[in-house]
Image (cartoon, rainbow, N blue to C red):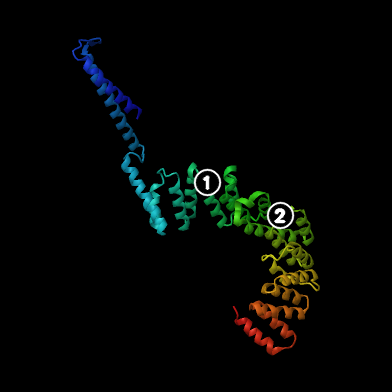
Amino acid sequence: MIRVLLLLVFLVAGLMIGPNLVGEKGYVLIALKHTTIEMSVISLGIMVFIAVIGFLILEWAVKRIVGAISGSHHWLGSWGERRRQRFYTSGMQALAEGDLNHAQKWLSKTTKADFDGINLLALADVEAKLGHQVKAMQYWEQAAAIKGSELAAKLNMARFEITQNHGKQALSIIDSLSIQQKQKPNVIETWASALAAAGEWHALRERLESGWKKPLGQRYPYWAELASKADFAEIANRDGANELMQEWQKLPRGYKKEIPHQKAYIEQLIAQGMHQEAEKALVTAQKSGPEITLLPLFKLLQLPKPTAAIKLLEKWIKKDNKNAVLYSTLAHVAFHSGNAILAEKALNQALELDNHQEDILLLAEIKAQQANSDEALALYKQGLSAN
């Protein structure tokens, strides 16, 4: 471009100055050993102009010839670019339509073209869907070497490793990302999946605790419960329930107030047979009112005297005596404690408000224990036919 501009400047200058030189007798004399060349200034200017034009044409031709010999994909100029663009467009359309074979055919013709790695990412996706895992990984690795597609390629590689249960390999890929890249929500989501696939539950729980809550957003409760449940189970199975309770006490206050962590902790207490401790935790966690996520855990309690739980449930029922869930929960707690009278009373109240299969079957069991076989059989039939 600069050369063309300079050429235009010289041409314009020649057009302006040329007429003023017409009629001038000035000449140029070139003396060689055996030859003498004499020409006018105008002739010299024309020769120089033609020489420059010739040089530019020769340079263009040499570049095209060298490009063709070395295998360059640009030797056909703009026609080749349009051709590759057509392959890319056809491949992406085929991929969107779910025609993987044609998508593979067209996109494979663009591997050496410059599409900022998007073509390589698409081709890797096609190969992965076709079950060609090695080829998919190769194309992701190529895309990872391109700045514009590096992050997308590495995330896809990590996600693929996760699907293969190769958590360690996925974590290795994530470790290669920059600090700034690791702060992105989609990266954190993949990172959490990699830690889960690697079985590093304690590390996942610590990451969640130290600053992943905001970037994960609505996905945070899922990961929080999953990590806590697995980590608490690992601690309890390895060191016992007492060690689990000590670990819970060490946790930050804010962490212990979060429902997913409370649910995971209480479930593990019940699994370890620590029903009394589970009751205390349930009551403490719901002092301000029933929590829909924790309420079902009352039904799992197996205590001879669940005084605190029954007292809390009856308090809630006084404030909301049309809540079938509360009556049902009270009935199950009472039944497991051996208080069939309170359980039957609560079940009748619950069934007046809503017919749940679980409550019908529990009432049938109570009737069977009371030797009311006809009522028990009728309730069993009703319960088994209920949705």
**Residue furthest toward the bottom?**
374
Q: What residue is pinned by disc 2?
A: 255
Most foreground residue, 198 or 336:
336
Assess disc 1: are there few (<14), some (14-19) or many (≥20) residues with their C-alpha within 10 Å of its C-alpha: many
Q: Residue 45: give its label.
A: none
Task: Identify the residue at image location x=74%, y=67%.
Answer: 270
Mark sitting earlier along the chain (2/1): 1
Nearer the observer, disc 2 or disc 1?
2
Task: Identify the residue at image location x=58%, y=57%.
Answer: 165
Residue 56 drawn at (x, y percent): 30, 28
Q: Can residue 47 be seen in this view?
A: no
Where residue 281 sits, quadrant-wise, is bottom right
Q: In which quarter of the image is the N terminus?
A: top left
- Distance (Cα) linking label 2 and label 1: 32 Å
Q: Is residue 361 visible?
A: yes
**For residue 90, side relative to residue 122 (left or right):** left
Task: Identify the residue at image location x=40%, y=53%.
Answer: 92
Residue 112 drawn at (x, y percent): 41, 44
Report helix, strand or loop for mark 2: helix
Most foreground residue, 248 or 190:
248
Residue 352 drawn at (x, y percent): 66, 80
Q: What residue is pinned by disc 1?
A: 151
Q: Quadrant of the C terminus?
A: bottom right
Assess disc 2: are there few (<14), some (14-19) or many (≥20) residues with their C-alpha within 10 Å of its C-alpha: some
Report helix, strand or loop for mark 1: helix
What's the residue type where badge 2 is placed?
Answer: Tyr
**For residue 60, side relative to residue 172 (left or right):** left
Task: Identify the residue at image location x=65%, y=49%.
Answer: 211
